[in-house]
């Protein structure tokens, strides 16, 4: 299943404020998921196997590493947690890094919100404006993402241009030199 997503990721020390805004906006709370994302070595884009109670899928995506709202081209495959998929990918590609996080998942219409606590990295907020069937234009998705950034008062300084996997890899490099 292919999806067009406009997304942001930001450092956040105001999770309670974000939760309150989502509650006031009557966001649909899906729950808190403990997710293990195993990133595999690939030549292009990012490939991860997400193992969680709420979300379990193989995800390939590519996007520019730039701060602010950015387009992400995503292909998802719903994974059976009992399948040997992780073993096969590990043997074939090797593991790049593992991201361990606790994620609160909310929705308002087509916009998904993550309030994340990531081991070894800290706390974050993600906003994903999602077009599952190309019925929403890229411009509308950008507008939605920017609107929630403004509502949550996310500053440019807090925006992160890379994935959690990139942050962890960089952290490992920094501590080994």
Image (cartoon, rainbow, N blue to C red):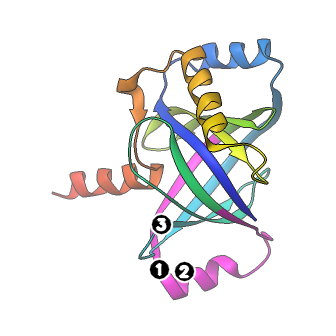
Residue at image position (69%, 79%) is 85
**Residue 146 is covered by the magenta coloring:** no
Q: For this view, does 35 lie left or right of residue 29? A: left
The vertical placement of 104 against 162, above or below, is above
Q: Position of residue 70 (x, y in %)?
A: 50, 43
Q: Position of residue 106 (x, y in %)?
A: 75, 33
Name the secondary structure under disc 3: loop
Of all residues, the one furthest to the left in this rendering is 177
Name the secondary structure under disc 1: loop
Q: Position of residue 101 (x, y in %)?
A: 58, 45
Placement of the N terminus among the 4 image quadrants:
bottom right
Q: Cβ–Cβ below 8 Å for labels 2 and 1?
A: yes
Q: CA distance from mark 2 to mark 3?
A: 17 Å
Placement of the C terminus among the 4 image quadrants:
bottom left
- Residue at label 1? 94
- Residue at label 3? 45
Residue segment shown in magenta: 75-102
Neighbor class of circle 2 (other Cα within 10 Å; few <14, some 14-19, many 20+) is some
Q: Quadrant of residue 7?
A: top right
Camera-side residue: 29 or 156? 156
Camera-side residue: 118 or 106? 106
Specify which label sits upstream in the sequence, 1 or 3: 3
Residue at image position (64%, 76%) is 86
- Residue at label 2? 90
Residue at image position (79%, 50%) is 54
The vertical placement of 13 against 3, above or below, is above
Mark 1 vs mark 3, foreground winner is 3
């Amino acid at each position: 299943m292919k999806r067009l997503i406009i997304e942001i990721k930001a450092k956040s020390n105001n999770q309670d404020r974000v939760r309150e805004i989502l509650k006031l906006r009557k966001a649909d709370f899906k729950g808190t998921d403990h997710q293990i994302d195993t990133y595999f070595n690939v030549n292009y884009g990012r490939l991860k196997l997400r193992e969680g109670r709420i979300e379990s899928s193989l995800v390939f995506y590519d996007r520019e590493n730039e701060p602010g709202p950015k387009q992400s081209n995503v292909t998802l495959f719903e994974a059976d947690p009992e399948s040997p998929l992780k073993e096969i990918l590990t043997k074939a590609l090797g593991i790049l890094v593992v991201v361990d996080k606790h994620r609160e998942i909310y929705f308002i219409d087509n916009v998904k919100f993550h309030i994340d606590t990531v081991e070894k990295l800290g706390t974050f907020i993600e906003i994903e404006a999602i077009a599952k069937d190309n019925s929403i234009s890229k411009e509308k998705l950008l507008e939605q993402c920017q609107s929630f950034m403004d509502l949550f008062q996310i500053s440019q300084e807090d925006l992160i241009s890379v994935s959690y996997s990139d942050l962890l890899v960089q952290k490992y490099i920094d501590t080994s030199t």
